Image (cartoon, rainbow, N blue to C red):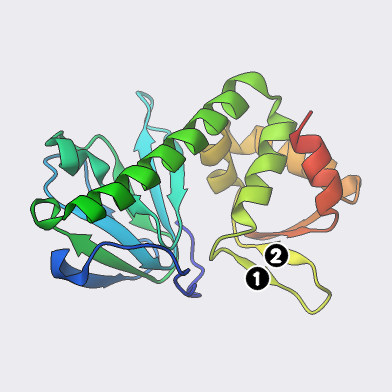
Amino acid sequence: MLLNTRTQTSTQTARPDRSTFVDTVSHRPGSVILYPGKSDMLYRVASGLVRVHTMDDDGNGLTLRYVKPGDYFGEEALAGLDRQYFAEAVTDSSVDVINPALMSAEDNLIVTTHLVRTLERAYESIYRLVGKRLRARIAGELLELKDTALATVQPSGETMIYATHDELAAAVGSVRETVTKVVGELSREGVISAGYGKITLKDETALARISAE
C-alpha cells in the first residue's frame, strides 16, 4: 500500500455530461474502490491516482495499469461483463461514478476514444513485459510514474517518486529482491537515487535510453 497522501489536480480532458454521473466519491490512499465481481457502473478519476491490479495463482500482486485523472476504469460494465480485478486508490483520489445506461452517443464516443488509448498502452506494457529486460522495464516504469500523483518535483528540479520496491516489482512482473538489485545498480550508475519508499530520477535521459534497450 502506498502511503503518499498528496492530491493531483484533474487534467482538462473530455468527460461525459454531468447528468450521467451518479456520484463523486473521495477515497483515501489504500482504499479498495472495486473488487472482482458484478459490474454495473463506469468510473472516471477526477483527481489522484488509482491502481488496477490482480493476483496470480501464488497470491502475488500484479499491477495491470495506473489510472490517471481524466481516465476511466470499470469499462467491463459497458458490456455487462464481470470484473476480474481490484481497483485501489494510491493517493487521495476523487472518482466520478457514471451510469452507462444514461450515456449519450457523444459520451460513448468519449469513452471509446479512451478505450482505444488504453488498449494502445496495454500493448506497450505487454511488449515491455515480454520483450524487455528487467532493467529496461524498471526504467520505463519510473518514467511512466513521473507523470502521476506519486511524483513531486524537488527544488533541484529533479523528480522524486513515492514507490516501494514491492510496488515496482508488482508493476514490472518481478519480485522485490530482484528489483532491489537492479535499483541498486541504477543508483550506483548515478541514474537514480533510492531511499525508503522513494526514488529520485537523477538522469532522465539515461533512463529513457535504458528503457529503450
- The label shown at residue 180 is none
Residue 14: image quadrant is: bottom left
Q: Quadrant of the C terminus?
A: top right
Residue 56 shows in the view: yes
| Label 1 vs 2, first from the N-terminus | 1
SS label for mark 2: strand
Q: Amino acid at mark 1?
A: Thr
Residue 173 shows in the view: no
Q: Residue drawn at (79%, 79%), measured in percent from left and top?
A: 155
Disc 1 vs disc 2: Cβ atoms closer than 8 Å? Answer: yes
166 and 42: which is toward the camera:
42
Task: From the top left corner, tell me how far across and down residue 40 is, in percent.
Answer: 11, 48
**207 with respect to 3 (left or right):** right
Task: From the top left corner, tell me how far across and down residue 50 is, in percent.
Answer: 40, 56
Residue pointed to by mark 1: 152
Relative to 146, does residue 213 appear above or below in the rendering? Answer: above
Q: Residue drawn at (69%, 29%), measured in percent from left and top?
A: 134
Task: From the top left corner, tell me how far across and down residue 61 is, in percent.
Answer: 42, 37
Mark 1 is surrounded, within 10 Å at the Cα level, by few (under 14), some (14 to 19) or many (20 or more) other residues, namely some
Outermost front residue: 105
Q: Residue drawn at (61%, 47%), measured in percent from left and top?
A: 165
Residue pointed to by mark 2: 160
Q: Amino acid at mark 2?
A: Met
Relative to 133, does residue 186 appear above or below in the rendering? Answer: below
Q: CA distance from mark 1 to mark 2?
A: 5 Å
**27 with respect to 18 (left or right):** right
161 and 197: which is toward the camera:
161
SS label for mark 1: strand
Q: Looking at the image, how many numbered discs can be counted on the residues?
A: 2
